[in-house]
Amino acid sequence: MQNPMPASPTINEASFAQFPMIRYAVEIGWQVLSRDEALALRGGESGKFFRSVLEEKLRSFNPWLSKEAVGSLYEKLDSLPANIEGNREILLWLRGEKTIIR
């Protein structure tokens, strides 16, 4: 059976999803980083998060957390698998369904 929608070299995920999302992010104040800058903030290829940025935001949103608690939460999030199960777990944290007890 022939594919009813032939692939077009001009239609791709980057042009329809990634680039518009980047443009929007810049419009609302996000900063575009080079690959080298992103790798440095992530601590290399295996890092999932910009550690210093995430820890700063965790402290600003949760001023009652100690520095040790913020570090512990970062380590917990960073240890989650980079798959759908890990994404679900992070979503629970973002929704407030998982918390750190004061």
Image (cartoon, helix red, strand yellow):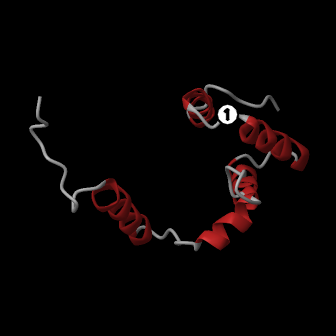
Question: Which residue is found at the position 35% from the left and 59% from the top?
Answer: 14
Nearer to the camera, 51 or 79: 79
Provide residue 83's location: percent of width, then percent of height: 58, 33
Residue 46, position in %: x, y? 72, 51
User: Where is the N terminus found, in terms of image quarters?
Assistant: top left
In the displayed structure image, the side of residue 94 where residue 58 appears, left or right: right
Judge from the rendering whether residue 5 lies leftward or rightward of residue 21; answer left or right: left
Q: Is residue 42 left or right of residue 89?
A: right
For label 1, the SS is loop
When asked about the image quadrant of residue 50, the answer is: bottom right
The residue at 32%/63% (across/down) is 20
Q: What residue appears at the point 43 percent right and 71 percent down from the top-left corner?
A: 26
Q: Where on the picture, by quarter, is residue 12?
A: bottom left
Q: Which residue is mark 1?
A: 81
Outermost residue, right side? 68
Q: How many marks?
A: 1
Toward the front, the furthest residue is 1
Q: Is residue 65 visible?
A: no
Q: Quadrant of the C terminus?
A: top right
Residue 27 vertical position relative to residue 92 in the rendered view, above or below: below
Residue 50 seen in render: yes
Q: Position of residue 18 (x, y in %)?
A: 38, 58
Image quadrant where residue 54 sits:
bottom right
Query: Please, is residue 72 above or below residue 96 in the view?
Result: below
Q: Nearer the viewer, residue 31 or 80?
A: 80
Amino acid beneath label 1: Pro
